[in-house]
Amino acid sequence: MKNAPYDVIVVGAGNAALCAAISAQEQGAKVLVLERAPQEKRGGNSAFTGGGFRMVYKGLEDVKKFVPDLTADEIASTDFGGYTREEYLDDLGRMTEYRIDPELAEILVDKSTETAEWLRKKGVRFVPRYGAQAYKHEGRFQFFGGLVVEVVGAGLGLSEAEFKAAEKQGITIRYNARATSLLYGRAGVEGVRLVADRVEEDVRAGAVVLACGGFEANREWRTSYLGPGWDLAKVRGTRYNTGDGIKMALDIGALPCGNWSGAHADPWDLNAPEYGDRDIGDAFGKHSFLFGIMVNANGLRFVDEGADFSIFTYAKYGRKILEQPALMAWQIFDSKVIDRLRSTYRIKQVTKVTANTLEELAGKLEGVDKEQALQTLKEFNAAVRKEVPFNPNIKDGRGTTGLTVPKSNWAQTIDTPPFEAYGVTCGITFTYGGLKITTKAEVVDAEEKPIPGLYAAGELVGGVFYFNYPGGAGLMNGAVFGRVAGASAAQYTARR
Ligand SMILES: Cc1cc2nc3c(=O)[nH]c(=O)nc-3n(C[C@H](O)[C@H](O)[C@H](O)COP(=O)(O)OP(=O)(O)OC[C@H]3O[C@@H](n4cnc5c(N)ncnc54)[C@H](O)[C@@H]3O)c2cc1C
């Protein structure tokens, strides 16, 4: 656009936004990034993540491309498995009950490997996800669940690497700059109105990419769209994702899309702060429930803790906990499995009790019916199919028999002291409802026609995740569509 100071404005500075900004700049665009947060809190939810990226990979050879410094020892003791295009598409279909937009699903999957390679070239470093996606069993690690790598330094490492790449490419980043509306003229979107230091300002550009997150940190919208109780959920990440981007687009006629009553939410430490803590990152998350049981305030189990690998269940079990009395539960383990719990169970800021007998433990579970909890443990122990061998690296079929709420895999009696229990509540990660985009990341209006000059990527796009989610797909979704949105916006503005 003539006389506009920028070709592309990117709203937000998380993973999706920075991938969009870098990609637009690669196409020759002059790019401005607007970050609502102050510099020391920059990077959105992406900076809080465990850094797991889900991608198609063909075994060791592909893993080596992302982790060139794998040691001989790691190679010898690990079966990295593989993850095909079909498996990725199947997982997305299964998790979303086949509601995912099939075209977006194919783009996400087909561009996953090349996008991880692109990130690596931009300075993002990866390591194998030992401990979470592969356990040492009979001397070997075997990867499962399709999520093989995470970023060195987790979310903060990712965010720092992406900011460094953006700055190196000469992209301008403004902090404390909250976009509030879109400048919309005859030709389409022409820029953004923002508020900085309480002063309104208009900035013009040829195109705008919205990548400023969902509405998980907006208590009022949560209650309106997700339902009662969601006002009381803890926010796992940033406080700045309050749905601004979605609202700005809806205000000019964009079409709402996807699972507006759905959200990604996990079992999260009972006493975690209201919003995420960047120093703790995702370590308030308690995802090793598959090795024990969870009881609610009535002392009853309420989910199949071993229904699948937790990478396929954790994102829907937050909601289940929210639905329990007092919105909480306790996860119970015995000493047989303690060394299998993820490192997030060993942080200082943890709600934990220990005991040498089950009776003593049940008495320490604050807010729980002690007698019923003991009864539940007794019935659970009696129901375990002890004849089936335990194997944490496969769905081992070692379940229970005869329980109203079964446990399908990894069931072990809870009978060997010392016992440990961890208090959890619901932590909301991000919301699933948002804007509808095309395969070029163009935002569409009520007639499903692209709104000229408007693009979107990341959490605020609807139509990708419904009900549940395969871990590691959020960052990949942001990166893939961020790249697409940035390139599309730059090409559009060059034509304009
Ligand atoms: C604790 C935790 C752990 C997670 N672990 C993983 C994981 O290991 N793997 C995975 O795939 N996913 C993970 N996720 C999910 C992942 O964070 C999201 O899928 C992804 O980061 C979303 O990226 P995004 O760029 O869309 O949003 P964000 O990273 O949240 O970025 C949104 C940006 O927009 C800014 N913003 C908001 N409103 C405005 C406004 N009005 N104006 C200007 N800027 C604005 C925010 O400040 C922020 O910079 C995790 C999430 C959390 C919270």
Image (cartoon, rainbow, N blue to C red):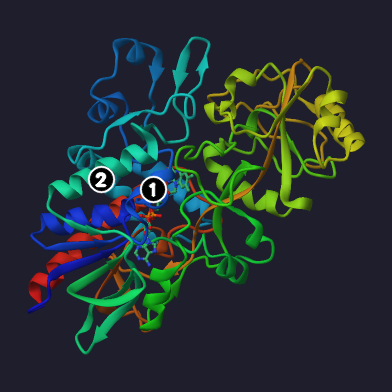
Disc 1 residue crowd, few under 14, some 14–19, many 20+, Cα 10 Å: many
Secondary structure at numbered mark 2: helix
Q: Position of residue 353 (x, y in %)?
A: 73, 28
Residue 418 drawn above or below residue 486: above
Q: CA distance from mark 2 to mark 1?
A: 11 Å
Please give the label number shown on residue 477.
Answer: none
Position of the N terminus, as image quadrant, is bottom left
Labels 2 and 1 touching (C-beta < 8 A): yes
Give 279 or 299, whichever is nearer the viewer: 279
Give 482 or 206, whichever is nearer the viewer: 206
Q: Residue furthest bottom?
A: 186
| Residue type at tag 2 | Glu
Q: Earlier in the sequence, mark 2 or mark 1?
A: 1
Q: Residue furthest right?
A: 371
Q: Position of residue 328 (x, y in %)?
A: 72, 46
Decide if ligand 1 comes within 8 Å of the CB at mark 1.
yes
Q: Please tell me which residue is depicted at 30% across the width and 68% down the height of the picture.
A: 438
Query: Badge 1 is on which residue?
Result: 46
Disc 2 residue crowd, few under 14, some 14–19, many 20+, Cα 10 Å: many
Secondary structure at numbered mark 1: helix
Position of the C terminus, as image quadrant, is bottom left
Q: Please tell me which residue is depicted at 60% across the width and 65% down the height of the picture.
A: 226
Please give the label number shown on residue 162.
Answer: 2
Q: Is residue 273 found left or right of 301 in the rendered image?
A: left
Q: Please tell me which residue is depicted at 65% across the width and 66% down the height of the picture.
A: 227
Q: Position of residue 394 (x, y in %)?
A: 54, 26
| Residue type at tag 1 | Ser
Residue 415, image quadrant: top right
Residue 464, image quadrant: bottom left
